[in-house]
Image (cartoon, helix red, strand yellow):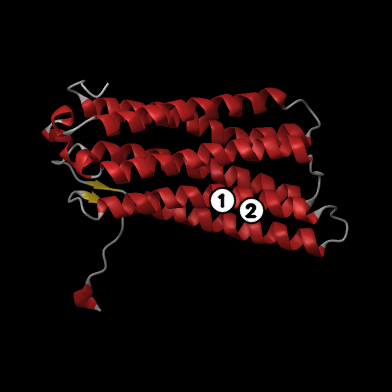
Amino acid sequence: MSSDPDFGTQLEALTETYFFDLGKCVELLPQILSEYEDNGSYDETLEQIQALESDCDRTVREINATITNAGPSEMGLLNSRVHFNSSALIQFYQKLDVIANTTERIAQELQMMQPAHGNECYDGLQEMAACTAREITTLEDVVQRFVHSLRNTTEQEVLTAEIAAIRDMESECDRIRNRVIATAFEDDSVAQPLMYREFAILFDELANTMEDVTDQIIIISSHEPGIVAESRVDTDTQ
């Protein structure tokens, strides 16, 4: 693939493919929690999540190979910024893949641990699942625009509002996590509080990883004119 002259188009297409699967994977979390709570069958949803995680693994390996195996001549002048940031981009896509891995782990833990539902702690986990589903939708938009802007040096892309929204959603997950854990240990009617603590931490890790991805975008963009990922403080007004 690296010999293809249109390297940038390939990278964008692979990123779009990756997020098509990643988005569906994360968005199935609220569904599997609801199916479990309704005492229905959630095996099919679990299998879907596992299959999507495997698809994400294959695509991210292809993305990494595409970047690693391509030099300046294969990428072309239009993709010089991708070549300059190739090491950082490989780490970037690896961080993205942690999202898929964590999503699969949450679904598998649900099957293995079988937490009680119909209580405030489980309701909190459902809130966190819904929050991460919203967060991945915004992250998809940010990542695809970021990758596109890396190879379009004549255009300016401003991602500050969307990145701020992701940070707000991560903070919301933090608040719900704290509430779930506090309730689990304070409410004597809640059995196995450590189980809810583990689930809350896993969901929080999922939200944190999405925020970490935006942090990497900010770092890469700080060296690239035309990509604004963080509001700049005017030191003259300080």
Q: Is residue 142 in view?
A: no
Residue 53 percent location from the top left of the image: 54, 30
Residue at horizontal 22 percent and vertical 77 percent from the top: 237
Q: Nearer the viewer, residue 48 or 157?
A: 48
Q: Which residue is mark 2?
A: 201
Q: Which residue is mark 1?
A: 205
**How far is the residue under mark 2 from the one under mark 1?**
6 Å
Q: Answer few, some or many: residues within 10 Å of disc 2's Cα (few below 14, many 20 plus, some between 14 and 19).
A: some
Dot 1: what SS? helix
Q: Is residue 188 left or right of residue 216?
A: right
Q: Is residue 210 in view?
A: yes
Residue 202 percent location from the top left of the image: 62, 48
Residue 111 percent location from the top left of the image: 74, 34
Residue at horizontal 75 percent and vertical 34 percent from the top: 36
Looking at the image, do the residues carrying marks 2 and 1 touch, with CB atoms under 8 Å apart?
yes
Dot 2: what SS? helix
Q: Nearer the viewer, residue 144 or 67?
A: 67
Q: In the picture, which quadrant includes the C terminus?
A: bottom left
| Residue type highlighted by circle 2 | Ile
| Residue type highlighted by circle 1 | Glu
Reply above or below: 57 against 166.
Answer: above
Q: Is residue 195 left or right of residue 164?
A: right
